[in-house]
Amino acid sequence: MPGATPHCELKIKAVPNASKSELVGRLGDAWKVRLQAVPEDGKANKALVAFLAEKLSVSRKSVELVAGSASHEKRLRIEGLSVQEVEQRLQA
């Protein structure tokens, strides 16, 4: 589709209650992320969105949790970046 905004979906294995928020690396087909936030009242999900937005240099509005809000296994939609761009930025 010409002019379509690139986007992709990203699988995340989230580990809340960590000593610091950090990208650990690949875990199968997902990325493992440790979050300092606690898994109460959506705090860890909000922290994950903010962390990934900063890591990918996109706005928080460009990162949307689409599945797994109450699970360690999450799926997020990233607007404005292709799969290749996301992979490059996370590996940097």
Image (cartoon, helix red, strand yellow):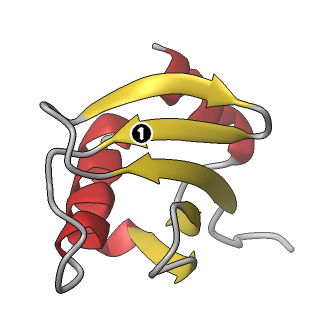
Q: Where is residue 86 in the image (x, y as percent from the top left)?
A: 58, 39
Work out whether 80 lies above or below 14: below
Mark 1: amino acid: Val
**Horizontal side of residue 50 vs 6, given as left or right:** left
| Observer-nearest of 55 and 70 | 70
Tell me the residue at 71%/44% (across/down): 83
Task: Farthest residue to the top: give it.
Answer: 92
| Observer-nearest of 18 and 6 | 18
| Observer-nearest of 7 and 15 | 15
**Horizontal side of residue 87 vs 18, given as left or right:** right
Work out whether 48 lies above or below 36: below
| Observer-nearest of 2 and 89 | 89
Q: Which residue is under mark 1?
A: 33
Question: In the picture, residue 44 is in which quadrant?
Answer: bottom left
Q: Position of residue 64 (x, y in %)?
A: 45, 75
How many numbered discs?
Answer: 1
Q: Where is residue 47 in the image (x, y as percent from the top left)?
A: 20, 60
Q: Position of residue 13 (x, y in %)?
A: 55, 49
Tell me the residue at 16%/62% (across/down): 38
Question: In the picture, residue 92 is in which quadrant?
Answer: top left
- The answer, for residue 59, to whether it is visible in the render is no
Task: Farthest residue to the right: give it.
Answer: 1
Tell me the residue at 25%/48% (across/down): 51
Residue count near mark 1 (Cα–Cα under 10 Å), binned few <14, some 14–19, many ≥20: many
Quadrant the N terminus occupies: bottom right
Label 1 secondary element: strand
- The answer, for residue 78, to whether it is visible in the render is yes
Work out whether 76 lies above or below 31: below
**Horizontal side of residue 78 vs 41, given as left or right:** right
